[in-house]
Structures are given as structure tokens and as C-alpha cells.
Image (cartoon, rainbow, N blue to C red):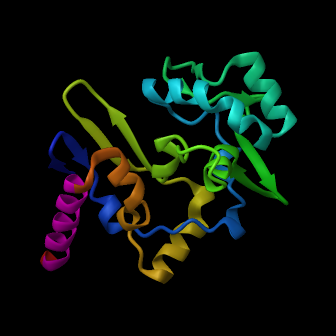
């Protein structure tokens, strides 16, 4: 672990490799698990605003869940989250064949909205936990992502490079530049 500004960062994001391999996992991270995607307070407002524009991209099951539960929910641990369909799929999940995709991101890709998706989804496999004085930035290792780890290793893409755009979105260009410097220094030490 090392400190970077007001973040405590796991070295795993520099040392482990990762590239999503949707052809192997089929987007399982959007349909497996026991909670929705983590949200910030600001993101809950965004979801409320964009829902009418995203709704045409969603499955009827997702629309039903959102209209019953809301565009976001408070989870069992009191965190803000996306709602789930029958405690399984994220309500915003759509499918291309058997591959799960994000309905929000599809609306973004088609220029309907200007918000890509929740930053927690964009950052994955990195998870950020905010505390009073700092944020913890960790690599979330999950068995369903083994194909992504293998592909990342084959392509030699460390986690932090795979999620560069999302890290800049969350922490800014300067923070990311500092992270790259730490990565270079760490590489020289080995």
C-alpha cells in the first residue's frame, strides 16, 4: 500500500494484469453478486435525471424493478446502489445474446446522454471505499474475472492502465500522473 494525495492505494493495481474478456465471462459482474453497483450521492441524482432517456434501452424486467424500487436504492449495508432484478441482475443490465451490457452505457454510446455509467462500474476491478480522511483504492479479485486476468497477463496490461479513463474520471489527471510515476519507480526497483 502507498499513499497518493488523499488516497491509500493497493500495489496490486500496479502489479496485477487485467483486461475484460466479455467473450469469456459474458459480463457476469453485472448479474452475479448480492448487491447493486455502488453509487455516490451525486450519481443518484444523475440516475433520476437520465432515467427517462435510458428507459428505452432497458429490459422490461429492469424497468419494472426501477419503477418499483426507484432509480437507486439503499442497500443492506446502508450504501447507495443500483436496484436489482429479483436480487440478481442489475436493473440497468441489458443483453446482447448471452452477454450482459449496461443500458446506461448503451444510451451514452449512442449520444443520448453524456454520462457513461456509475464510476464504480467504470473502475471495475478497482473498488474505492471512501472514509472521512482518505479513500482506499483496491483491486477486487473475483473468480469470475479469471479470464480477464489471463488476457491482461497475455497482453501485459496492468489494472491501472486498463481503467485509466475511469481513474482520471474519479481522481483527476494529476493524480493519475502521480500513479504512473509510482508504477515506473516500482518497476525500476524490481
Residue 84 in the image, given as x and y percentages of width and height: 71, 30
The image shows a total of numbered marks equal to 0
Residue at 40 percent of width and 58 percent of height: 165
Magenta region, mostly helix, strand or loop?
A: helix
Asked if residue 90 shows in the view, the reply is: no
Percent of width and height locating residue 125:
48, 53
Compared across the picture, whether 48 is left or right of 125 comes to: right
- Quadrant in which residue 150 is drawn: bottom right
In the rendered image, residue 34, in percent from the top left (x then y), is placed at: 64, 33
In the image, is residue 172 above or below residue 23?
A: above
Residue at left offset 18%, top offset 73%:
184
**Magenta-highlighted residues:** 174-188
Residue 30 seen anywhere in this rendered image of the structure: yes
Q: Which image quarter: residue 37?
A: top right
175 lies left or right of 55: left
**Furthest residue in direction front, as rendered:** 111
Image quarter in which the C terminus is found: bottom left
Asked if the stretch drawn in magenta spans residue 28, the answer is no
What residue is shown at x 22% (from left), y 60% (from top)?
179
Residue at the image position 68 percent from the left and 51 percent from the top:
106
The foreground one among 6 and 15 is 6
Q: Nearer the viewer, residue 105 or 38?
A: 105
Q: Is residue 56 left or right of residue 129?
A: right
> Could you say which quadrant of the image residue 143 lies in?
bottom right
| Up-down relation of residue 2 to residue 155 (above or below) | above
Image spot of residue 156 (x, y percent): 42, 80
Whether residue 183 appears in magenta in the rendering, the answer is yes
Amino acid at each position: 500500500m502507498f499513499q497518493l494525495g488523499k488516497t491509500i492505494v493497493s500495489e496490486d493495481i500496479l502489479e496485477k494484469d487485467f483486461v475484460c474478456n466479455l467473450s469469456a465471462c459474458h459480463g457476469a459482474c453485472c448479474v452475479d453478486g448480492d448487491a447493486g453497483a455502488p453509487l455516490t450521492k451525486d450519481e443518484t441524482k444523475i440516475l433520476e435525471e437520465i432515467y427517462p432517456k435510458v428507459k428505452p434501452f432497458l429490459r422490461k424486467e429492469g424497468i419494472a424493478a426501477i419503477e418499483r424500487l426507484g432509480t437507486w436504492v439503499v442497500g443492506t449495508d446502508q450504501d447507495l446502489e443500483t436496484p436489482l432484478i429479483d436480487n440478481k441482475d442489475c436493473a440497468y443490465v441489458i443483453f446482447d445474446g448471452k452477454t450482459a451490457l449496461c443500458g446506461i452505457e448503451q444510451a451514452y454510446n449512442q449520444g443520448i446522454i453524456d454520462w457513461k455509467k456509475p464510476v464504480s462500474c467504470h473502475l471495475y476491478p478497482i473498488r474505492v471505499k471512501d472514509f472521512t480522511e482518505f479513500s482506499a483504492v483496491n483491486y477486487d479479485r473475483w473468480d469470475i474475472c479469471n479470464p480477464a486476468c489471463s488476457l491482461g497477463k497475455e497482453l501485459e496490461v496492468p489494472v491501472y492502465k486498463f481503467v485509466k479513463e475511469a481513474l482520471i474520471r474519479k481522481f483527476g489527471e494529476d493524480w493519475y500522473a502521480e500513479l504512473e510515476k509510482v508504477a515506473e519507480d516500482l518497476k525500476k526497483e524490481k
